[in-house]
């Protein structure tokens, strides 16, 4: 239901000419970042824009900041909702009611637009008649500054798509903020953001894709999306609140609404593509967190998602990698502790701890033979070649069972290797822990002794002071690997660690002083994580010299500094 703003919330009447594009900036309690978002709009190379700051009844300094921005430029209008809606939809919809331009865009207050975003998207509209234009989204990690492209493979080529059926894979790009819509298109279909739910972008975008006769994709960046993966849980964005079961329910609820829309609008042919998108993207977002959830959360998660998983297209499952199909089936069967083990291997070619063969020789994940035809299809790991792949690419599972600090910069590890395909010969195995903070690897050999068929265990002491660092020092993180040797061949795999153990910290002595930290990875696979940080003269002198001098000069300058310190 539409809520009309009160008189106090009504924006001032604009005096500028009719703009070409209206950009709505939605904000709630974000006074600090709002000016950055608006500044990115004021820098647009196409200046004929209207900027509506739509405030979802903020309780911090946002209103005063917004009013100052409004007073600073006649293109800016401030709209304050009379009460908080709890989501993104209402602020966007209220702004749509007063927007004056024939083209519309949306921006979140914690993000930015590249300065030519409006120009690029508007040019696509003026090139030919389309319902919306979309471009590339640049993701920026606020903790590291790392930049990547969201769904890069979908937006790497300029083209006009005549209906989503021509490219159903674009359903993966469900952001409403990466697009410029014609006002006529939205009004003609009464297309507005669904209020009272989260993940509204997914439903809105699915509807827009299905209703559009044509839309243009451009490969240039049109949106900067700032990602804060380690933001405090209470302050995290909706997509980063995966620790809440309510978040899971919201996501499933939106999927059901999309399914209903596809059926009602005659787009059921897209159902398999949409289901695949849910399994590959939405469910996958929770999968990496499963090892870190307690039993109560896991039980609640399975109760929410399993009924919906039962409704999805078998063809969508068949498109997934085997490891993801195994995980999904373990969740559906309520084998949640095994699901946690499976989740740690996603994306890392990690084998199960054990596999069970039937009379025909097929191998299945875990200690049990599947009870149904469907389960046999999903848990069949025969195609992983656990017992047949060439040794260098064979899959094993290496787990650190204990991490103990030693003297100086040494750490003692107890390692257990699982060989479910029984690839390794009976008897002790030659192994090494490998870590490379520089070009030269530190390889620490040790022996894995048989515990029972398919299981080996050994202990190794790793002296991190022996790791050869670059002459300019090293500031970064490495995850050690485990290497097995057999008949002159080598197999290198991920080394999983306990999900929690006390952090170990020591200072590397010598000319290149570093603080070295050994800690759990704390996410995804849960590997052993070693972090080097230059300290003292290394941080004050060697590092700055290295950054100023390029190529071979780095090595010469760093050597001079090191020799002076001896």
Image (cartoon, rainbow, N blue to C red):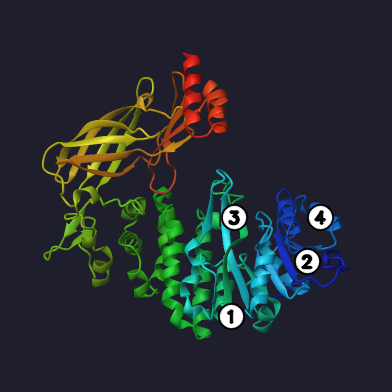
- Disc 2 marks which residue? 50
Mark 3 or 4, which is nearer the eye? 4
Relative image position of residue 384 (x, y in whole percent): 24, 58
- Disc 3 marks which residue? 237
**Is residue 198 in sight in this rendering?**
no
Mark 2 or 3, which is nearer the eye? 2
Pointers 4 and 2 in contact (C-beta within 8 Å): no
Pointers 2 and 1 in contact (C-beta within 8 Å): no
- Disc 4 marks which residue? 69
Circle 2 packing at 10 Å, graded few (<14), some (14-19), many (20+), is many
Distance between the alpha carbons at the discs numbered 4 and 2? 13 Å
Of callouts 4 and 2, the N-terminal one: 2
Give the quarter of the image for residue 5.
Answer: bottom right
Q: Secondary structure at mark 4?
A: helix
Residue 212 got which mark?
1
Relative image position of residue 272 (x, y in whole percent): 41, 76
Of callouts 4 and 1, the N-terminal one: 4
Of callouts 2 and 3, the N-terminal one: 2
Q: Secondary structure at mark 2?
A: strand
Distance between the alpha carbons at the discs numbered 4 and 1? 35 Å
- Name the quarter where the N terminus is drawn: bottom right
498 sits to left or right of 54: left
Pointers 3 and 4 in contact (C-beta within 8 Å): no
Between 160 and 205, the one lying in front of the other is 160
**Is residue 293 in sight in this rendering?**
yes
Relative image position of residue 29 (x, y in whole percent): 71, 53
């Amino acid at each position: 239901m539409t809520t009309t703003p009160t008189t106090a919330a009504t924006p001032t009447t604009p005096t500028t000419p009719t703009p070409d594009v209206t950009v709505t900036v939605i904000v709630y309690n974000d006074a600090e970042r709002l000016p950055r978002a608006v500044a990115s709009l004021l820098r647009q190379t196409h200046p004929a824009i209207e900027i509506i700051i739509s405030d979802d009844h903020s309780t911090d300094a946002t209103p005063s900041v917004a009013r100052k921005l409004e007073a600073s430029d006649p293109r800016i209008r401030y709209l304050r909702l009379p009460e908080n809606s709890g989501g993104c939809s209402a602020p966007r919809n209220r702004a749509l009611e007063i927007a004056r331009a024939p083209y519309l865009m949306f921006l979140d207050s914690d993000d930015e637009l590249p300065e030519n975003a409006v120009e690029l998207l508007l040019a696509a509209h003026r090139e030919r008649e389309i319902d919306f234009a979309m471009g590339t989204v640049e993701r920026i990690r606020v903790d590291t500054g790392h930049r990547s492209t969201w769904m890069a493979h979908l937006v790497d080529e300029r083209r006009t798509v005549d209906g989503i059926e021509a490219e159903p894979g674009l359903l993966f790009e469900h952001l409403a903020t990466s697009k410029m819509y014609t006002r006529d298109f939205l009004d003609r279909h009464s297309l507005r953001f669904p209020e009272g739910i989260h993940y509204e972008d997914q439903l809105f975008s699915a509807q827009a894709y299905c209703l559009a006769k044509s839309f243009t994709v451009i490969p240039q960046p049109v949106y900067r999306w700032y990602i804060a993966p380690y933001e405090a849980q209470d302050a995290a964005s909706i997509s980063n609140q995966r620790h809440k079961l309510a978040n899971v329910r919201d996501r499933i609820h939106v999927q059901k609404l999309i399914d209903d829309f596809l059926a009602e609008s005659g787009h059921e042919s897209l159902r398999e593509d949409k289901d695949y998108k849910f399994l590959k993207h939405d469910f996958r977002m929770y999968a990496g967190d499963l090892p870190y959830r307690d039993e109560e959360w896991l039980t609640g998660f399975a109760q929410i998602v399993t009924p919906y998983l039962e409704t999805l297209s078998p063809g969508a499952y068949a498109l997934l990698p085997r490891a993801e199909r195994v995980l999904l089936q373990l969740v559906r069967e309520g084998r949640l502790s095994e699901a946690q083990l499976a989740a740690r291997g996603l994306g890392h070619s990690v084998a199960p701890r054990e596999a069970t063969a039937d009379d025909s020789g097929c191998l299945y994940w875990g200690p049990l033979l599947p009870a149904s035809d469907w389960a046999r299809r999903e848990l069949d790991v025969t195609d992983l070649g656990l017992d047949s792949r060439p040794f260098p690419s064979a899959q094993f599972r290496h787990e650190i069972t204990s991490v103990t600090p030693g003297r100086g910069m040494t750490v003692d590890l107890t390692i257990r290797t699982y060989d479910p395909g029984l690839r390794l010969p009976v008897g002790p195995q030659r192994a090494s822990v490998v870590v490379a903070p520089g070009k030269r690897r530190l390889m620490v050999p040790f022996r894995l002794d048989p515990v029972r068929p398919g299981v080996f265990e050994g202990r190794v002491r790793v002296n991190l002071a022996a790791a050869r660092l670059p002459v300019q020092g090293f500031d970064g993180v490495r995850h050690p690997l485990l290497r097995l040797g057999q008949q002159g061949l080598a197999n290198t795999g991920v080394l999983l660690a306990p999900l929690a153990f006390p952090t170990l910290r020591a200072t590397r002595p010598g000319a290149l002083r570093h603080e070295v930290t050994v800690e759990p990875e704390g996410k995804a696979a849960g590997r052993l994580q070693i972090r080097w940080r230059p300290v003292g003269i290394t941080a004050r002198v060697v590092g700055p010299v290295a950054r100023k001098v390029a190529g071979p000069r780095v090595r010469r300058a760093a050597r001079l500094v090191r020799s002076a310190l001896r």
